[in-house]
Amino acid sequence: NEDGSLGVTEGAPTADELMALHTLIGKAQDDAERLSFNTTVPALMVAASRLAELGCRKRAVLEPYLIVLAPLAPHVAEELW
């Protein structure tokens, strides 16, 4: 967006943003160990909703989110990266 409203920022993540991210990472790791990938997708959606509610546009949160997303939706993750 030309006005920068969709740009990624370099600010430090808040505790709530980190909580959403780390909850997702923990769930994805557990699912991968159990080969239960079908429950990772809803966890990605929950994290995305929570981060959107928080207005998160911070690189320190969005990059790890995309790394979790990449094995399940590589083309989307690549475009967002």
Image (cartoon, rainbow, N blue to C red):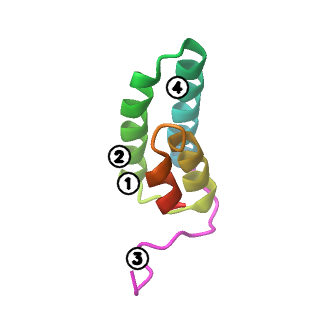
Rendered image: mark on residue 27: 4
Question: Bounds of the magenta span?
Answer: 1-14
Count of marks overlaid on the render: 4
Q: CA distance from mark 3 to mark 1?
A: 13 Å
Crowding at dot 1, Cα within 10 Å, few <14 / some 14-19 / many 20+, comes out as few
Q: Earlier in the sequence, mark 4 or mark 1?
A: 4
Q: Amino acid at mark 1?
A: Ala
Q: Earlier in the sequence, mark 4 or mark 2?
A: 4
The quarter in which the C terminus is drawn is bottom right
Q: CA distance from mark 4 to mark 2?
A: 16 Å
Residue occupying image coordinates x 60% and y 25%: 29
Q: Is residue 70 above or below residue 7?
A: above
Q: Amino acid at mark 2?
A: Ser
Q: Pointer 3: what residue? A: 5
Q: CA distance from mark 4 to mark 1?
A: 19 Å
Q: Position of residue 15 (x, y in %)?
A: 57, 46
Crowding at dot 4, Cα within 10 Å, few <14 / some 14-19 / many 20+, comes out as some
Q: Earlier in the sequence, mark 3 or mark 1?
A: 3
Membership of 10 in magenta stretch: yes
Q: Is residue 30 above or below residue 51?
A: above
